[in-house]
Image: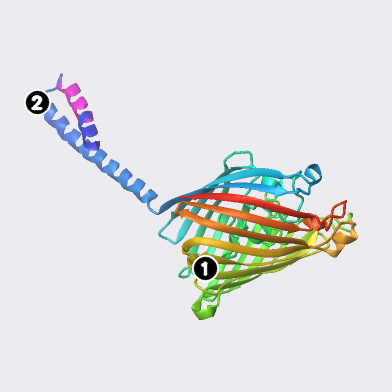
């Protein structure tokens, strides 16, 4: 096609000139035309190679998540005792470009709608039941955009841009992906770790001095508003030990500490409204057999400025090989969010909010999975019984459909 296009141009120029030219002029112009065509062809080849080089190393992926959840006996005042069914969806598109110098450029777009049954007039909890719900109105948004550089034989990595801190800290092999694992907020990340308000401007660094240890640290804009970036910061540091217990099977034992210095108000002294928040935690996962992996989390934060000061969770993931469904996954987890003493002294009900979640991820094919999910919450928002003395327990039944590409 390119050759025919060039010939067409050459023919047009040639016949236009031929009408009033001598034989010598014709030969001269033909020679000039050959040179110009050769130069044009060379430039087109260079542009083609440049475009090909630019596209090399680019990968595109993403997925769509659709969730329907229904709650029995909603506990929020506006829907007290009602049965509610809501839906939500999110669609993600990810583009990644790798460079020969060890660098990576990553861009992540997302569109979604629905808050699910965690809408403010339906469920009132310390920790939510649908981590995937965006609460958005269907507008496309840029959720991540960063550049990452590896060096020192890939033992050191540095990342900057618009980052999601949950991708780097308090992670977990079997309790860290709301699109395929647990849906409950406290099983995705600690319920007592105050990350920035949203994905935002940040930098993080990671260093692996050996195969069994990883060090990480990061700093983000705590308010996530891209204004006065140095005034309110979220900072976190983590160490991850990676021993190979149980005949060389993988394990991760993460310990971290964090500080969020945006303004907080003390629960028992409203005049002190410029306090910082801080805490620490751990996140473990260990593979015991080829099909069984267990996890546990624990966290603590300052009870003077937060409603809850402690949270713990534990559970397991079991692959379906034993019952002839190799790609299916069963997950079960329990945990509690524990209100602090100052929250109780401020006159609030302060019983431990208990969570139980079980899911079964049914593998349909490499692009599609369907996951029934059930969650039971005891003492929601610290309330042990309702006004009539009945146990105030919430049950949430749901189904998640995940399409990946």
Disc 2 element: helix
Number of numbered labels in the structure image: 2
Q: Residue furthest front?
A: 323
Residue located beneath label 2 in the image: 23
Residue 105 appears in the picture as rendered: yes
Residue 170 appears in the picture as rendered: no
Q: Position of residue 321 (x, y in %)?
A: 48, 66
Q: Which residues are magenta?
A: 9-18
Q: Earlier in the sequence, mark 2 or mark 1?
A: 2
Looking at the picture, tell me which residue is in the foreground, 47 or 304.
304
Q: Position of residue 267 (x, y in %)?
A: 86, 57
74 left or right, relative to 254: right
Q: Position of residue 211 (x, y in %)?
A: 51, 75
Q: Using a 10 Å C-alpha cutoff, classify the residue at mark 2 as few (fewer than 14 neighbours), some (14 to 19) or many (20 or more).
A: few
Whether the magenta-drawn stretch holds residue 15 is answered as yes
The picture quadrant where one finds residue 342 is: bottom right
Looking at the picture, tell me which residue is in the foreground, 131 or 5.
131
The residue at 85%/59% (across/down) is 343
Q: Using a 10 Å C-alpha cutoff, classify the residue at mark 1 as few (fewer than 14 neighbours), some (14 to 19) or many (20 or more).
A: some
Looking at the picture, tell me which residue is in the foreground, 383 or 31.
383
The residue at 86%/57% (across/down) is 349
Quadrant occupied by the N terminus: top left
Q: Is residue 109 above or below residue 315?
A: above
- Give the Cα separation between the discs numbered 2 and 1: 70 Å
Disc 1 element: strand
The residue at 42%/52% (across/down) is 58
Q: Magenta region's main secondary structure? A: helix
Q: Position of residue 175 (x, y in %)?
A: 60, 63
Residue located beneath label 1 in the image: 156
Whether the magenta-drawn stretch holds residue 369 is answered as no
93 left or right, relative to 12: right
């Amino acid at each position: 096609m390119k050759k025919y296009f060039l010939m067409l141009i050459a023919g047009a120029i040639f016949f236009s000139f031929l009408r009033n030219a001598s034989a010598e002029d014709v030969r001269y112009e033909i020679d000039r035309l050959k040179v110009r065509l050769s130069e044009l062809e060379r430039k087109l080849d260079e542009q083609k190679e440049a475009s090909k080089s630019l596209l090399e190393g680019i990968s595109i992926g993403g997925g769509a998540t659709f969730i329907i959840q229904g709650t029995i006996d909603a506990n929020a005042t506006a829907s007290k005792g009602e049965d509610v069914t809501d839906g939500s969806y999110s669609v993600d598109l990810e583009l990644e470009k790798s460079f020969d110098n060890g660098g990576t450029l990553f861009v992540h777009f997302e569109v979604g709608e629905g808050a699910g049954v965690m809408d403010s007039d339906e469920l009132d909890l310390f920790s939510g039941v649908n981590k995937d719900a965006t609460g958005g109105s269907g507008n496309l948004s840029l959720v991540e955009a960063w550049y990452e550089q590896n060096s020192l034989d890939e033992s050191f990595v540095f990342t900057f841009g618009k980052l999601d801190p949950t991708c780097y800290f308090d992670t977990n092999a079997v309790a860290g992906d709301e699109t395929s694992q647990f849906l409950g907020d406290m099983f995705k990340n600690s319920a007592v770790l105050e990350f920035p308000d949203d994905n935002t401007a940040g930098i993080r660094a990671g260093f692996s001095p050996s195969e069994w240890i990883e060090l990480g640290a990061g700093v983000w804009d705590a308010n996530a508003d891209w204004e006065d970036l140095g005034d309110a910061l979220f900072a976190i540091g983590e160490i991850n030990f990676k021993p190979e217990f149980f005949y060389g099977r993988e394990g991760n034992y993460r310990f971290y500490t964090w500080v969020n210095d945006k303004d907080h108000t003390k629960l028992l002294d409203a005049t002190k409204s410029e306090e910082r928040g801080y805490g620490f935690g751990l996140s473990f996962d260990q593979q015991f057999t080829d099909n069984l992996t267990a996890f546990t989390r624990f966290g603590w934060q300052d009870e003077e400025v937060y409603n809850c000061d402690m949270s713990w969770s534990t559970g397991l993931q079991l692959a379906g090989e034993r019952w002839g469904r190799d790609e299916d996954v069963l997950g079960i987890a329990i945990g509690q969010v524990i209100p602090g003493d100052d929250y109780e002294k401020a006159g609030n009900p302060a019983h431990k909010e208990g969570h139980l979640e079980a899911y079964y991820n049914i593998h349909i094919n490499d692009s599609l999975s369907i996951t029934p999910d059930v969650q039971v919450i005891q003492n929601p928002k610290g309330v042990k019984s309702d006004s009539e003395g009945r146990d105030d327990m919430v049950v949430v039944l749901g189904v998640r459909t995940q399409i990946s590409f």
